[in-house]
Amino acid sequence: MRRSSFAIFHVMAVIVILVGLLTGPRLGIINHDFLTFLSPLLPQGALLSVHVLFGCLLTLIAIVFTVATIRTPFHGAPSKFDKAVNYFGYLVIVLSIVTGWLLWLNPESLSLVIHGLSATAIFLYLVLHGIKHTVFKGKQVLSVLLPRNALILLSCSIALVYFCGLGIKLIVAEQHLRLEVAPLSRQSHLEIDGKGDEPEWLRAKPIKLTTFGGANFLDGSSEVEIKALSNHDETFFLIRWQDPSESLEHLPLEKTSDGWQVQENGFYRFDERTYYEDKFAIMLSTTCELGGDGTVQYGDAPLAGKPHNWHGKGYHASTDGRTRDLWHWKALRTNDMYLADDNFFGPPQSVALGQRRYTAGYQPDGKESGAYVMNWRWYSPNEVTPKRMPIPSPDITERKVLDWFASETYNPQQDMAKIGEQLPSVLYRSNRFEGDRADVRARGEWHDGYWTLELVRKHQTHSPLDVELRSGVCMWVSAFDHAQIAHTRHHRAIQLRYML
Amino acid sequence: MTVASRLILSLAIATVAISYLLFSAPEREIPTHARFIKVTNDMQFLSVWQGPWHCVYDKKLNLLWEVKRDDESIHDGYWSYSWYDGQFGHADQGDCYFEASHCDSQDLIRKTNQASLCGSAEWRLPTPDELRSLIQTPNSPGKPHIASDFFPHIKNGDYWSSEAGVSLPKSFKREKLGATAVNFQSAETLSLPYENAAFVMLVATPSTPLSLAQSRVEPVTLN
Ligand code: HEM
Ligand code: HEM
């Protein structure tokens, strides 16, 4: 290979790798708090698709370079040290490419770990290789970095971007997991009871996928199995996922020597990962793009003119003006209502200055009356005053939610609770959501390391905040193991195909 | 440049970059609202994320607004009232727990003045204009048309104004006259019979100029 051809490969690889090194750690902050110190340097926004596009460019460059090298090798590196460093570089680049694609195709925690490590190694390689050459060769490096023939460079880049765009369109945007929705006769009756033991479920073909990157679970990942059935009116889903523990606590209150305190480990940053209930979310959309259909906005302030978030990880919001439907089942707050909270991801909402947490596009569908409220007058990390106490209170530690009619107004004079005693922080005002927010019926049961969740919704609710269920609609799932926002994820969309 | 000076230069650049990263932790500034300030019962101003607060000082209209609560006190947002001023209207047709009989707007005014909420004993029903000035598009679907971050526990329902003696639409057959209310769900103004149970949010003109009041230095709590 001639030096001028090598220079073209080299400069393209440098640019692509630099973009990978800038966008990758931004994705990595989702799981690794220690990376947040890099945040001021990193780009923000819907970066997953950018990262994958550049990952794809790197893959193409690597393939073409390998073929060209096999035909006519380039002899550039003069010293043994340079050679060793370069082989190390090639190895870790290949490793990042392989694990990068695995993360899209069939994610596992191990791929994520190796991908992260190989990215660190690429960075080290860049430092060793780049600094060494700059320090020893000075201005001469520019002759390698800047190819003489800009026209060839430009045409190569355009061709690469074109093929990658095409590749992504054909592979990433088309190769969805397919979920066949088996037909259900009008006579069949499925109980929404979290058991899924009706014989009809045996006819539904399951799909299995690994979701990864959540807090807790086993290594942060959970295997999910999904089945679907539909009649003319409604679609039923039966979902089973791994979760080693049944968690039914939601920021319980504990009596301390300083008064009642919220048990928390991250709630102040709206990223509670200990004292929370298990949850499960399903997102539905008529499009099937990467990055949670473009709703994941990475970074501490990814939306221009909108506030910073408190955990530095990101927001959910659409930037195309459309809404994605979101069903949010909560093991403590909604399970006993036999409902999932009907939410949506829409365009970023306007800012309410008096609210410390801004949730961008993540919002509940309208609700008429508050079903549950928090059992504290005002949240403070130091001390809170409960709104209500159970009547009478011998076994308050047993209760996870407090019913309005099983409780009375809190009176500090009559507070006989001993230090260490706990009090539920979820107070049911009524036992149902009303209106749009109550469209999704759901019930889950935990047994032997698995949650089984049954859900049902009408195909068409006529609410502008819901997505109609029909063939072609894409679906994503996320499991939460006693975590507020740190849920598992998967990047390949699941596409529904109705057999009816 | 020699190899040594290039090495030193690279190290210097790396040091600058690392110190930038380490020292540029984002400063989170607490915003201020152009119109509303949270005020505690003992007349302390709070920043937008502090609480609990019991009144809102409205800089634009120089008014204090009663803030509804979820604590079963007289200010609880769930209580409703019939329109009554001690002479006109219809007494005791609303729903609340703090009166032995049912409630009317005069009951809330009397109790609030007795307690000197936020330092004022001149609480009254707002005029329709005052009430309407609070209307704003909600930032979430289904929420009332008001700044819920400053005025929590406001329902998607009717709120009484002070304007009475207005004629009622024909659909009310028995009654001819009633009072004006603002509905925060539809953002519309309407007239309702006095005996109707509607919500109430009181208002007072502050006696001392509140803009001179000291804001509390120590944050109470951040939410
Ligand atoms: C220059 C090469 C690359 C670098 C430096 C790089 C860097 C990174 C880093 C640091 C992360 C975060 C890892 C973590 O959370 O621990 C990441 C995530 C990811 N990378 Fe790469 N990457 C590269 C190439 C690729 C390639 C070729 C692909 C293939 C499509 C790819 C796809 C992904 C995906 C899908 C994720 C997201 C996983 C998640 O949701 O956490 N990357 N990358
Ligand atoms: C690449 C994939 C994804 C990433 C990196 C991601 C990341 C995040 C982050 C950073 C938050 C916190 C936002 C905030 O504080 O407002 C969040 C919240 C949330 N995400 Fe995701 N997300 C992804 C995909 C999904 C998908 C596909 C679903 C639905 C199936 C989903 C469901 C949720 C829900 C329900 C919340 C709100 C939790 C709460 O505050 O109650 N996410 N996600």
Image (cartoon, coloured by chain):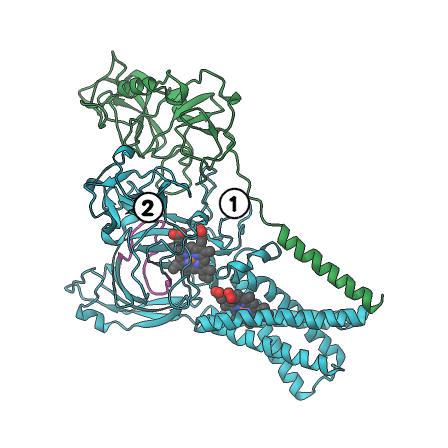
Chain colours: A cyan, B green
Query: Helix or strand or loop: what does disc 2 sit on?
Result: strand
Horizontal placement of A141 versus A441: left or right? right
On the image, numbered disc 2 is attached to which residue? A253
- What is the x, y in percent for residue B44? 46, 26
- Quick check: A284 above or below A396? below
Magenta segment main secondary structure: loop
Q: What residue type is labelled 2?
A: Leu
Q: In which quarter of the image is the C terminus of chain A?
A: bottom left
Q: Nearer the viewer, residue A14 or A149?
A: A14
Residue drawn at x 49%, y 54% is A314
Q: Does the magenta stretch include residue A467?
A: yes
Instruction: Indicate which disc residue A331 carries.
Output: none
- Quick check: A247 above or below A434? below
Q: Nearer the viewer, mark 1 or mark 2?
A: 2
Q: Which chain carries label 1?
A: A
At label 2, counting other C-alpha atoms closer than 10 Å, the crowd grade (few under 14, some 14-19, many 20 or more) is many
Q: Nearer the viewer, residue A136 or A167?
A: A136
- Give, as a single range, the part of the protein colored magenta: A457-480
- Quick check: A223 above or below B156? below
Residue drawn at x 39%, y 42% is B140
- What is the x, y in percent for residue B152? 37, 35
- What is the x, y in percent for residue B75? 31, 27
Q: Does the magenta stretch include residue A462?
A: yes
On the image, numbered disc 1 is attached to which residue? A307
Q: Are marks 1 and 2 in contact (CB under 8 Å)?
A: no
In which quarter of the view is residue A222 placed? bottom left
Quarter containing ligand 2? Answer: bottom left
